Image: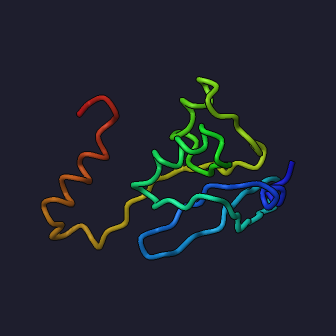
Amino acid sequence: QHPRDLLGHSCIRGRFPSGVMTPWEFERDGEVVRVDTTGPLLVSIGGGVDLAIDAAIAGVGILWLFEDWVRPHFESGALEAVLEPWWQEFSGPFLYYPGRRLVPAPLRAFIDYIKTPAGHW
């Protein structure tokens, strides 16, 4: 019913390479709630996403990820969505880089790639 209810559940956490573990953040009607969850599994953010999804499907705990990454599992019935009224909208991703002059070739290629509409690569 409320994000604080997660404190009574096993959750699958993610940790950045720096060691930082950010709280899970939810919002509804202007109320922002941050919850420091706990659970039996801690994965590396980025490389551990598939492991986290597989663990959630296996019943290890509740997972907090971008909706697009887990939508197929909701549709198949492998995962069940919780706290939907509290989900935040995500208008990103955003890429920030210094200036438009002298952009290194690999970065320029990446920028051009992500600006290309999906399916036109």
User: Percent from the top left, x then y, of residue 119?
Assistant: 31, 29
User: Which residue occupies 23% across, 49% down?
Assistant: 112
Which of the pair 9/72 is nearer the observer? 9
Whether residue 5 sits left or right of residue 58 in the image: it is: right
User: Percent from the top left, x then y, of residue 3?
Assistant: 79, 56
User: Which residue occupies 31% across, 46% down?
Assistant: 114
User: Which residue occupies 66% across, 61% down?
Assistant: 24
Which of the pair 16/9 is nearer the observer? 9
Is residue 39 depicted above or below 50 in this figure? below
Q: Quadrant of the C terminus?
A: top left
Q: How does the figure colour the protein chain or chains?
A: rainbow
Name the image quarter holding residue 77. top right
Q: Residue most toward the top?
A: 76
Looking at the rendered structure, the number of numbered marks drawn on it comes to 0
Whether residue 74 sits left or right of residue 31 in the image: it is: left
Name the image quarter holding residue 13. bottom right
User: Percent from the top left, x then y, of residue 98?
Assistant: 29, 73
Whether residue 65 sits left or right of residue 83 in the image: it is: left
User: Percent from the top left, x then y, of residue 40?
Assistant: 63, 59
Which of the pair 63/65 is nearer the observer? 63
Whether residue 116 sits left or right of residue 68 in the image: it is: left
Name the image quarter holding residue 101. bottom left
Which of the pair 33/75 is nearer the observer? 75
